[in-house]
Image: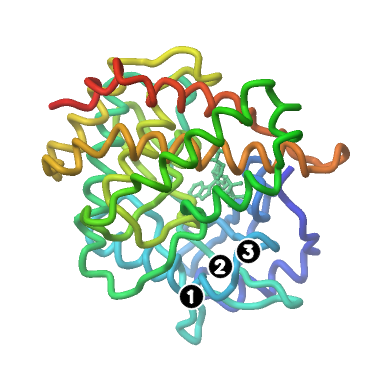
Amino acid sequence: MAVYTRLGAEEMAAIIGAFDVGTLVSAKGIAEGVSNSNWLIETQDSSGAARRFILTVYEARTDVQDLPFFLDLLDHLAARDCPVPRTMHDRDGASHRFHEGKALALIEFLPGVSVSDPAPAQARAVGAALAQVHLAAADFGCERVNSMGLAAWQQLLGDCGREGLEAIHPELARIVEHELALLSARWPANLPRGVIHADLFPDNVLMLGDTVTGLIDFYFACTDITAYDVAVTHAAWCFNADGTRFLPALSSALLEGYDSVRPLLDDERKALPLLARGAAMRFLATRAYDWLNTPDDALVTLKDPMAFARRLEFYANPANASIFAS
Ligand SMILES: Nc1ncnc2c1ncn2[C@@H]1O[C@H](COP(=O)(O)OP(=O)(O)OP(=O)(O)O)[C@@H](O)[C@H]1O
Ligand SMILES: N[C@@H](CCO)C(=O)O
Protein backbone atom coordinates (compact mmCIF):
# COMPACT_ATOMS: atom_id res chain seq x y z
CA MET A 1 0.00 0.00 0.00
CA ALA A 2 1.70 3.20 -1.09
CA VAL A 3 0.65 5.43 1.76
CA TYR A 4 3.72 5.87 3.93
CA THR A 5 2.62 9.13 5.55
CA ARG A 6 -0.29 9.17 8.03
CA LEU A 7 -2.53 12.22 7.76
CA GLY A 8 -5.45 12.79 10.16
CA ALA A 9 -8.75 14.26 8.93
CA GLU A 10 -7.99 17.75 10.31
CA GLU A 11 -4.49 17.74 8.84
CA MET A 12 -5.86 16.66 5.46
CA ALA A 13 -8.53 19.42 5.55
CA ALA A 14 -5.84 22.01 6.39
CA ILE A 15 -3.63 20.79 3.52
CA ILE A 16 -6.47 20.97 1.00
CA GLY A 17 -7.57 24.34 2.44
CA ALA A 18 -4.30 25.86 1.22
CA PHE A 19 -5.57 25.37 -2.36
CA ASP A 20 -8.57 27.10 -3.90
CA VAL A 21 -10.27 23.81 -4.81
CA GLY A 22 -13.36 23.72 -2.56
CA THR A 23 -14.04 21.86 0.68
CA LEU A 24 -12.62 18.40 1.40
CA VAL A 25 -15.27 15.66 1.08
CA SER A 26 -13.11 12.51 1.14
CA ALA A 27 -9.50 11.30 0.94
CA LYS A 28 -8.77 7.70 0.03
CA GLY A 29 -5.28 6.19 0.04
CA ILE A 30 -4.19 4.72 -3.32
CA ALA A 31 -2.57 1.28 -3.23
CA GLU A 32 -0.73 1.49 -6.58
CA GLY A 33 2.74 3.01 -6.82
CA VAL A 34 5.69 2.39 -4.55
CA SER A 35 7.70 5.62 -4.52
CA ASN A 36 5.38 8.19 -2.97
CA SER A 37 2.18 8.39 -0.89
CA ASN A 38 -0.93 9.14 -2.95
CA TRP A 39 -4.57 9.87 -2.10
CA LEU A 40 -7.64 10.34 -4.26
CA ILE A 41 -9.16 13.59 -2.97
CA GLU A 42 -12.77 14.68 -3.50
CA THR A 43 -13.90 18.21 -2.84
CA GLN A 44 -17.05 20.24 -3.35
CA ASP A 45 -16.73 23.72 -4.79
CA SER A 46 -18.94 26.73 -3.97
CA SER A 47 -21.44 25.79 -6.71
CA GLY A 48 -21.82 22.33 -5.13
CA ALA A 49 -19.92 20.60 -7.95
CA ALA A 50 -17.74 17.60 -7.06
CA ARG A 51 -14.05 17.79 -8.03
CA ARG A 52 -11.32 15.15 -7.87
CA PHE A 53 -7.56 15.43 -7.40
CA ILE A 54 -4.53 13.31 -6.58
CA LEU A 55 -2.58 14.41 -3.50
CA THR A 56 1.03 13.21 -3.59
CA VAL A 57 3.31 13.39 -0.58
CA TYR A 58 6.89 12.94 -1.81
CA GLU A 59 8.88 10.35 0.08
CA ALA A 60 12.65 9.87 0.20
CA ARG A 61 13.15 8.70 -3.41
CA THR A 62 12.03 11.99 -4.97
CA ASP A 63 14.52 14.85 -4.66
CA VAL A 64 12.60 18.01 -3.69
CA GLN A 65 15.04 20.09 -5.76
CA ASP A 66 13.64 18.36 -8.86
CA LEU A 67 9.99 19.14 -8.13
CA PRO A 68 9.88 22.46 -10.02
CA PHE A 69 11.16 20.62 -13.13
CA PHE A 70 8.57 17.81 -12.84
CA LEU A 71 5.60 20.01 -11.89
CA ASP A 72 6.33 22.91 -14.28
CA LEU A 73 6.75 20.31 -17.04
CA LEU A 74 3.21 19.01 -16.39
CA ASP A 75 1.82 22.54 -16.67
CA HIS A 76 3.86 23.20 -19.81
CA LEU A 77 2.65 20.01 -21.51
CA ALA A 78 -0.97 20.38 -20.38
CA ALA A 79 -1.03 23.93 -21.80
CA ARG A 80 -0.03 22.38 -25.16
CA ASP A 81 -2.89 19.87 -25.04
CA CYS A 82 -0.81 16.84 -24.09
CA PRO A 83 -2.81 14.33 -22.02
CA VAL A 84 -1.04 15.03 -18.72
CA PRO A 85 -2.49 16.24 -15.41
CA ARG A 86 -2.14 19.87 -14.43
CA THR A 87 -0.61 20.86 -11.12
CA MET A 88 -3.01 22.77 -8.85
CA HIS A 89 -1.18 25.81 -7.47
CA ASP A 90 -1.84 26.90 -3.89
CA ARG A 91 -3.32 30.27 -2.91
CA ASP A 92 0.20 31.76 -3.07
CA GLY A 93 0.78 30.40 -6.56
CA ALA A 94 3.23 27.66 -5.51
CA SER A 95 3.17 24.28 -7.29
CA HIS A 96 4.23 22.39 -4.16
CA ARG A 97 4.07 22.95 -0.41
CA PHE A 98 5.61 21.38 2.67
CA HIS A 99 3.86 19.56 5.50
CA GLU A 100 5.88 18.35 8.48
CA GLY A 101 9.06 18.54 6.42
CA LYS A 102 7.71 16.60 3.42
CA ALA A 103 6.88 18.16 0.06
CA LEU A 104 3.42 17.61 -1.40
CA ALA A 105 1.52 18.55 -4.55
CA LEU A 106 -2.11 18.47 -5.61
CA ILE A 107 -2.53 17.17 -9.15
CA GLU A 108 -5.52 17.13 -11.45
CA PHE A 109 -7.30 13.72 -11.45
CA LEU A 110 -7.60 12.21 -14.92
CA PRO A 111 -10.03 9.42 -15.83
CA GLY A 112 -8.86 6.14 -17.35
CA VAL A 113 -7.24 2.86 -16.36
CA SER A 114 -3.84 1.31 -17.00
CA VAL A 115 -4.05 -1.57 -19.45
CA SER A 116 -2.37 -4.85 -18.54
CA ASP A 117 -2.75 -6.55 -21.91
CA PRO A 118 -2.47 -3.78 -24.52
CA ALA A 119 -3.96 -4.04 -28.01
CA PRO A 120 -2.08 -2.67 -31.05
CA ALA A 121 -4.47 0.31 -31.33
CA GLN A 122 -3.59 1.22 -27.74
CA ALA A 123 0.15 0.93 -28.42
CA ARG A 124 -0.33 3.15 -31.48
CA ALA A 125 -2.06 5.80 -29.34
CA VAL A 126 0.73 5.65 -26.75
CA GLY A 127 3.37 6.08 -29.46
CA ALA A 128 1.52 9.12 -30.77
CA ALA A 129 1.12 10.61 -27.26
CA LEU A 130 4.84 10.14 -26.58
CA ALA A 131 5.74 11.96 -29.80
CA GLN A 132 3.30 14.72 -28.88
CA VAL A 133 5.11 15.16 -25.54
CA HIS A 134 8.51 15.30 -27.28
CA LEU A 135 7.32 18.02 -29.65
CA ALA A 136 5.48 20.00 -26.98
CA ALA A 137 8.48 19.91 -24.62
CA ALA A 138 10.80 21.46 -27.22
CA ASP A 139 10.28 24.97 -25.80
CA PHE A 140 10.30 23.93 -22.14
CA GLY A 141 13.13 26.05 -20.74
CA CYS A 142 14.40 23.76 -17.95
CA GLU A 143 16.83 20.87 -18.02
CA ARG A 144 17.41 17.91 -15.73
CA VAL A 145 20.27 15.43 -15.97
CA ASN A 146 19.16 11.80 -16.34
CA SER A 147 19.89 10.33 -12.92
CA MET A 148 19.22 6.86 -14.40
CA GLY A 149 21.68 7.04 -17.31
CA LEU A 150 24.66 4.85 -18.20
CA ALA A 151 26.72 5.94 -15.15
CA ALA A 152 23.85 4.94 -12.84
CA TRP A 153 23.49 1.50 -14.52
CA GLN A 154 27.22 0.92 -13.99
CA GLN A 155 27.01 2.04 -10.36
CA LEU A 156 23.90 -0.02 -9.52
CA LEU A 157 25.16 -3.18 -11.23
CA GLY A 158 28.62 -2.72 -9.72
CA ASP A 159 26.95 -2.52 -6.30
CA CYS A 160 25.11 -5.78 -7.05
CA GLY A 161 28.50 -7.45 -7.58
CA ARG A 162 29.28 -10.52 -9.66
CA GLU A 163 28.06 -12.86 -6.90
CA GLY A 164 24.80 -10.98 -6.46
CA LEU A 165 24.06 -11.06 -10.18
CA GLU A 166 24.94 -14.76 -10.36
CA ALA A 167 22.61 -15.44 -7.44
CA ILE A 168 19.78 -13.92 -9.51
CA HIS A 169 20.75 -16.04 -12.53
CA PRO A 170 24.00 -17.92 -13.27
CA GLU A 171 24.38 -16.18 -16.65
CA LEU A 172 23.48 -12.64 -15.52
CA ALA A 173 26.95 -11.38 -14.53
CA ARG A 174 28.40 -12.44 -17.88
CA ILE A 175 25.58 -10.77 -19.85
CA VAL A 176 25.81 -7.55 -17.83
CA GLU A 177 29.60 -7.32 -18.13
CA HIS A 178 29.52 -7.81 -21.90
CA GLU A 179 26.60 -5.45 -22.52
CA LEU A 180 27.80 -2.67 -20.21
CA ALA A 181 31.17 -2.61 -21.98
CA LEU A 182 29.47 -2.46 -25.36
CA LEU A 183 27.01 0.25 -24.32
CA SER A 184 29.79 2.40 -22.82
CA ALA A 185 31.82 2.11 -26.02
CA ARG A 186 28.97 2.75 -28.45
CA TRP A 187 26.43 4.99 -26.66
CA PRO A 188 25.51 7.66 -29.24
CA ALA A 189 26.62 11.25 -28.67
CA ASN A 190 25.01 13.16 -31.52
CA LEU A 191 21.34 12.22 -31.60
CA PRO A 192 18.63 14.87 -30.95
CA ARG A 193 18.01 15.49 -27.27
CA GLY A 194 15.08 16.93 -25.37
CA VAL A 195 12.79 16.29 -22.43
CA ILE A 196 11.91 12.61 -22.10
CA HIS A 197 9.49 10.75 -19.79
CA ALA A 198 11.98 7.88 -19.34
CA ASP A 199 9.55 5.46 -17.62
CA LEU A 200 6.48 5.19 -19.85
CA PHE A 201 5.31 1.72 -18.78
CA PRO A 202 1.65 0.70 -19.15
CA ASP A 203 1.08 1.49 -15.45
CA ASN A 204 2.04 5.11 -16.17
CA VAL A 205 -0.54 5.51 -18.94
CA LEU A 206 -4.27 5.96 -18.26
CA MET A 207 -6.55 4.94 -21.12
CA LEU A 208 -10.24 4.81 -21.99
CA GLY A 209 -10.60 2.30 -24.81
CA ASP A 210 -7.98 3.20 -27.42
CA THR A 211 -7.64 6.79 -26.20
CA VAL A 212 -4.81 7.96 -23.96
CA THR A 213 -6.41 10.03 -21.20
CA GLY A 214 -3.34 10.49 -19.03
CA LEU A 215 0.42 10.11 -19.05
CA ILE A 216 1.46 10.16 -15.39
CA ASP A 217 4.44 9.64 -13.08
CA PHE A 218 6.92 12.03 -14.66
CA TYR A 219 9.33 11.54 -11.74
CA PHE A 220 12.14 10.18 -13.94
CA ALA A 221 11.61 12.84 -16.64
CA CYS A 222 14.89 14.43 -17.70
CA THR A 223 16.86 15.80 -20.64
CA ASP A 224 18.30 12.99 -22.75
CA ILE A 225 18.31 11.40 -26.23
CA THR A 226 14.75 11.70 -27.52
CA ALA A 227 14.84 8.34 -29.35
CA TYR A 228 15.95 6.66 -26.08
CA ASP A 229 12.44 7.42 -24.76
CA VAL A 230 11.02 5.54 -27.76
CA ALA A 231 13.33 2.64 -26.86
CA VAL A 232 12.20 2.70 -23.19
CA THR A 233 8.56 2.70 -24.23
CA HIS A 234 9.23 -0.10 -26.72
CA ALA A 235 10.87 -2.25 -24.04
CA ALA A 236 7.97 -1.53 -21.67
CA TRP A 237 5.09 -2.25 -24.10
CA CYS A 238 6.21 -4.76 -26.72
CA PHE A 239 6.86 -7.95 -24.72
CA ASN A 240 4.84 -10.17 -22.44
CA ALA A 241 5.47 -9.51 -18.75
CA ASP A 242 8.35 -11.94 -18.21
CA GLY A 243 10.08 -10.92 -21.44
CA THR A 244 9.93 -14.40 -22.98
CA ARG A 245 7.77 -13.29 -25.93
CA PHE A 246 8.22 -10.29 -28.25
CA LEU A 247 4.89 -8.89 -29.48
CA PRO A 248 5.48 -7.74 -33.09
CA ALA A 249 2.02 -6.22 -33.63
CA LEU A 250 2.49 -3.93 -30.61
CA SER A 251 5.98 -3.00 -31.78
CA SER A 252 4.86 -1.96 -35.28
CA ALA A 253 1.85 -0.09 -33.90
CA LEU A 254 3.88 1.81 -31.29
CA LEU A 255 6.48 2.90 -33.86
CA GLU A 256 3.82 3.82 -36.43
CA GLY A 257 1.95 5.87 -33.84
CA TYR A 258 5.12 7.72 -32.90
CA ASP A 259 6.10 8.32 -36.54
CA SER A 260 2.62 9.66 -37.34
CA VAL A 261 3.29 12.65 -35.05
CA ARG A 262 7.10 12.98 -35.04
CA PRO A 263 8.73 10.92 -37.80
CA LEU A 264 11.96 9.38 -36.52
CA LEU A 265 15.09 10.59 -38.31
CA ASP A 266 17.16 7.95 -40.13
CA ASP A 267 19.94 8.23 -37.54
CA GLU A 268 17.45 7.80 -34.69
CA ARG A 269 15.92 4.73 -36.27
CA LYS A 270 19.34 3.18 -36.93
CA ALA A 271 20.29 3.77 -33.29
CA LEU A 272 17.14 2.13 -31.89
CA PRO A 273 18.58 -1.41 -31.54
CA LEU A 274 21.40 -0.03 -29.37
CA LEU A 275 19.15 2.41 -27.48
CA ALA A 276 16.78 -0.46 -26.73
CA ARG A 277 19.67 -2.49 -25.29
CA GLY A 278 20.35 0.51 -23.06
CA ALA A 279 16.68 0.77 -22.08
CA ALA A 280 16.58 -2.91 -21.13
CA MET A 281 19.81 -2.45 -19.14
CA ARG A 282 18.34 0.53 -17.25
CA PHE A 283 15.41 -1.50 -15.87
CA LEU A 284 17.55 -4.60 -15.38
CA ALA A 285 19.90 -2.44 -13.25
CA THR A 286 17.25 -0.94 -10.92
CA ARG A 287 15.37 -4.22 -10.63
CA ALA A 288 18.52 -6.25 -9.88
CA TYR A 289 19.63 -3.68 -7.29
CA ASP A 290 16.20 -3.69 -5.61
CA TRP A 291 16.06 -7.52 -5.80
CA LEU A 292 19.27 -7.80 -3.79
CA ASN A 293 18.83 -4.81 -1.46
CA THR A 294 15.15 -4.67 -0.45
CA PRO A 295 14.50 -5.99 3.08
CA ASP A 296 12.31 -9.12 3.19
CA ASP A 297 9.67 -7.32 5.29
CA ALA A 298 9.31 -4.32 2.92
CA LEU A 299 5.74 -3.80 1.73
CA VAL A 300 6.63 -3.83 -1.97
CA THR A 301 6.31 -6.45 -4.66
CA LEU A 302 9.73 -6.82 -6.25
CA LYS A 303 9.94 -6.70 -10.04
CA ASP A 304 11.82 -9.49 -11.81
CA PRO A 305 15.18 -8.34 -13.27
CA MET A 306 15.27 -11.34 -15.62
CA ALA A 307 12.24 -9.98 -17.49
CA PHE A 308 14.57 -7.21 -18.72
CA ALA A 309 17.64 -9.47 -19.13
CA ARG A 310 15.52 -11.43 -21.64
CA ARG A 311 14.55 -8.23 -23.46
CA LEU A 312 18.23 -7.25 -23.50
CA GLU A 313 19.18 -10.54 -25.14
CA PHE A 314 16.40 -10.11 -27.67
CA TYR A 315 17.58 -6.61 -28.63
CA ALA A 316 21.24 -7.73 -28.72
CA ASN A 317 20.48 -10.46 -31.27
CA PRO A 318 21.37 -9.01 -34.73
CA ALA A 319 18.58 -11.10 -36.27
CA ASN A 320 16.07 -8.88 -34.45
CA ALA A 321 17.44 -5.48 -35.52
CA SER A 322 14.98 -5.41 -38.44
CA ILE A 323 12.04 -4.80 -36.08
CA PHE A 324 13.08 -1.14 -36.00
CA ALA A 325 13.47 -0.74 -39.79
CA SER A 326 10.82 1.53 -41.33
N1 LIG B 1 -3.38 12.40 -12.33
C1 LIG B 1 -3.89 11.21 -12.00
N2 LIG B 1 -5.16 10.91 -12.30
C2 LIG B 1 -5.69 9.71 -11.94
N3 LIG B 1 -5.02 8.77 -11.25
C3 LIG B 1 -3.75 9.02 -10.92
C4 LIG B 1 -3.11 10.24 -11.27
N4 LIG B 1 -1.85 10.21 -10.78
C5 LIG B 1 -1.71 9.04 -10.17
N5 LIG B 1 -2.85 8.31 -10.23
C6 LIG B 1 -3.10 6.98 -9.64
O1 LIG B 1 -2.21 6.81 -8.55
C7 LIG B 1 -1.38 5.66 -8.75
C8 LIG B 1 0.02 5.93 -8.20
O2 LIG B 1 0.60 7.03 -8.90
P1 LIG B 1 2.12 7.02 -9.32
O3 LIG B 1 2.36 5.89 -10.27
O4 LIG B 1 2.47 8.39 -9.78
O5 LIG B 1 2.77 6.73 -7.89
P2 LIG B 1 4.28 6.59 -7.49
O6 LIG B 1 4.34 6.01 -6.11
O7 LIG B 1 4.99 7.88 -7.71
O8 LIG B 1 4.69 5.56 -8.60
P3 LIG B 1 5.84 4.53 -8.89
O9 LIG B 1 5.95 3.71 -7.70
O10 LIG B 1 5.28 3.80 -10.08
O11 LIG B 1 7.06 5.33 -9.21
C9 LIG B 1 -1.42 5.40 -10.24
O12 LIG B 1 -1.23 4.05 -10.53
C10 LIG B 1 -2.84 5.85 -10.61
O13 LIG B 1 -3.75 4.82 -10.31
N1 LIG C 1 8.89 1.08 -14.41
C1 LIG C 1 9.99 0.57 -13.61
C2 LIG C 1 9.86 0.97 -12.18
C3 LIG C 1 10.07 2.45 -11.98
O1 LIG C 1 11.32 2.85 -12.47
C4 LIG C 1 10.06 -0.97 -13.73
O2 LIG C 1 9.09 -1.59 -14.18
O3 LIG C 1 11.08 -1.53 -13.35
Q: Distance between the residues labelled 3 and 2?
A: 15 Å
The tag earlier along the polypeptide, 3 or 2, is 3
How packed is label 3: few (under 14 Cα within 10 Å), some, or many (20 or more)?
many
Instruction: Inspect this view and state whether residue 51 appears.
Output: no
**Mark number, residue 230:** none
Q: How many labels does the image show?
A: 3
Q: How far apart are marks 1 and 3 (CA)?
A: 19 Å
Q: In which quarter of the image is the C terminus?
A: top left
The tag earlier along the polypeptide, 1 or 3, is 3
Q: Quadrant of the N terminus?
A: top right
**Relative to 319, residue 325 above or below:** below
Q: Which residue lies furthest to the right in this view?
A: 297
Secondary structure beneath dot 1 equals: loop
Callout 2 amino acid: Ala
Secondary structure beneath dot 3 equals: strand
Residue, x 25% and y 53% (percent of image)? 134
Q: Is residue 77 left or right of residue 108?
A: left
Instruction: Inspect this view and state whether residue 159 appears.
Output: yes
Callout 1 amino acid: Ser
Residue, x 74% and y 39% (percent of image)? 300
Secondary structure beneath dot 2 equals: strand
Q: Which of 238 and 26 is in front in this view?
A: 238
**Mark number, residue 105:** 2
Q: Which of 92 and 155 is in front in this view?
A: 155
**Relative to 54, residue 292 above or below:** above
Q: Position of residue 121 (x, y in %)?
A: 26, 23
Residue, x 20% and y 43% (percent of image)? 268
Residue named by callout 1: 95
**Mark number, residue 24:** 3
Q: Which of 213 and 231 is in front in this view?
A: 231
Q: Are marks 2 and 1 in contact (CB under 8 Å)?
A: yes
